Amino acid sequence: MPWKNGGGETVEIAIDPPCADLDSFGWRISMATVGSDGPFSAFPGIERTLSILSGAGISLAVGNDDPVRLDTGSEPFTFPADMTAAAHLIDGPVTDFNVMTRRSDWRHTVRRVRMDAGTVLSTDQPSAAHTIVFCRSGVFEAGDGTTAASLTANATLWVECGADPWILRSAETGTVFVVEIEATGA
């Protein structure tokens, strides 16, 4: 789908509520290809976390702060999506991973987790309202002890609060992004 400002295209991974548009979502997860320098779309009342999936990276200027360099090795970068933000490509196009939540209703965290073959990531009981695991690279087996599924590049696992404990086991070296989304209680 087109960006809100018309400057590019995005692939929506998940959105809540399911039929929301860019002005009415509570939270949204997406990937986008950034092919040229320019401004980011403004999203009033939204907190945004950006991670670089591929390419040399970007220099991101938010508000009056000094630009931040983001590349495939950078930690996810969180900033207010209602502030002026502009990207300068470091050396060609990038693909990014984008998580946005409406501050009045939701908050989120994003972790980039690199896992070697045989490594296990698990939870006793998911405590976030939504836990989304986005596989960037590698092959993983995900399950709750009774069901299992394979997770490969660009696949997503969505775990609801109150679900059975789950385990993610890496079959080979790879990277996942773990997104936890919680209600603000406001």
Image (tube, grey):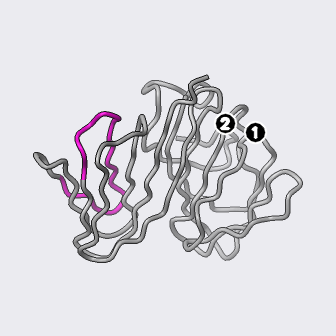
Magenta residue check for 82: no
Residue at 31% x, 70% y: name it: 138
Where's residue 48, x and y in %? 63, 46
Give the residue type at disc 1: Asp
Q: Is residue 162 above or below residue 86?
A: above
Q: Are marks 2 and 1 in contact (CB under 8 Å)?
A: yes
Give the residue type at disc 2: Ile
Residue at 70% x, 68% y: name it: 89
Where's residue 40, x and y in %? 72, 49
Helix, strand or loop at label 2? It is: strand
In this view of the protein, which residue sits in the foreground, 128 or 59?
128
Outermost residue, front direction? 124
**Can you tell which mark lies on residue 82?**
1
**Can you tell which mark lies on residue 111?**
none
Give neighbour class at mark 2: few <14, some 14-19, many 20+ (Cα, 10 Å).
many
Give neighbour class at mark 1: few <14, some 14-19, many 20+ (Cα, 10 Å).
some
In the image: residue 120, left or right of residue 48: left
Which of disc 1 and disc 2 is earlier in sequence? 2
Residue at 85% x, 58% y: name it: 65
Outermost residue, left direction? 146
Q: Which residues are magenta?
A: 149-166
Count of numbered badges drawn on the protein: 2
**Can you tell which mark lies on residue 46?**
2
Where's residue 11, x and y in %? 47, 47
Residue 114 placement: quadrant: bottom left
Helix, strand or loop at label 1? It is: loop
Q: Is residue 139 above or below residue 168?
A: below
Magenta residue check for 153: yes
In this view of the protein, which residue sits in the foreground, 125 or 117?
125
Residue at 43% x, 54% y: name it: 178
Where's residue 154, x and y in %? 37, 58
